Amino acid sequence: MILGRRKRKENRLPEITLTPLIDTALVLLVIFMVATPIMHNSLEINLPSGQMKEGAQSTASSLIVFISGEEKIQLNGTSYKLDSLLAELAKKVAKTKDTRVYVNCDRKVSSGTLVKVIDSIKYVAGVEHVILSTERVR
């Protein structure tokens, strides 16, 4: 006699494919890599040309002040009026004494405005090292 053979059902767990998840993660990584430098400097600034190299801008221990052609002022990407900028700088300088402030100023800004901002940063906010950023001549 032939007995009917029963087929065993294999208890397999469904496989989860990770390829779409990895693809999505890599696309998001590329998007953030491209968007971060754009978000860092939201003002369009044409730096004046120069040949001196004062030192590399390191954002960890230094502050960067941007002055656009329309004389809008930003500190590390946040917009301020001159008085509130000086108060914020004074707070940050009080925490770290050896703070460098880089001033990225557009070519269109008048020299009077630039001198006023730099003098205010040095004397009102108490910053010792103020460096005017330039674009290297090629």
Image: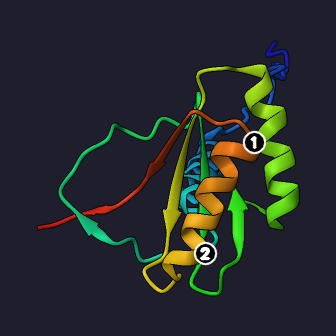
Which quadrant of the structure image shows residue 125?
A: top right
Q: Position of residue 44 (x, y in %)?
A: 54, 78
Name the mark on residue 113: 2
Please rate how many residues cluster around mark 1, counting C-alpha atoms within 10 Å: few if below 14, some from 14 to 19, many from 20.
Answer: many
Please determine whether, in this image, residue 93 is positioned above or below residue 25.
Answer: above
As rendered, which of 65 and 117 lies closer to the eye?
A: 117
Please state the horizontal and vertical placement of residue 24, each as a whole percent of the image: 65, 52
Work out whether residue 18 or residue 57 is closer to the camera in this orientation and state it: 57
Residue 63, given in percent of the width and then of the height, sits at 62, 42
For label 2, count other residues whose C-alpha is less than 10 Å away and answer few (under 14), some (14-19) or many (20+): few
**Residue located 44% across and 41% down the image:** 57
Name the side, left or right, on which 134 lies relative to 17: left
State whether residue 97 is above or below residue 72.
Answer: above
Question: Mark 2 vs mark 1: which is more N-terminal?
Answer: 2
Residue closest to the eye, 44 or 2:
44
Left or right of 133: which side holds 31?
A: right
Q: Residue at x 66, y 39 (%)?
A: 17
Q: Is residue 46 left or right of residue 97?
A: left
Residue at 63%, 44% in the rendered image: 122
Q: Are marks 2 and 1 in contact (CB under 8 Å)?
A: no
Residue identifier under label 1: 125
- Residue 105: tell me if it is visible: yes
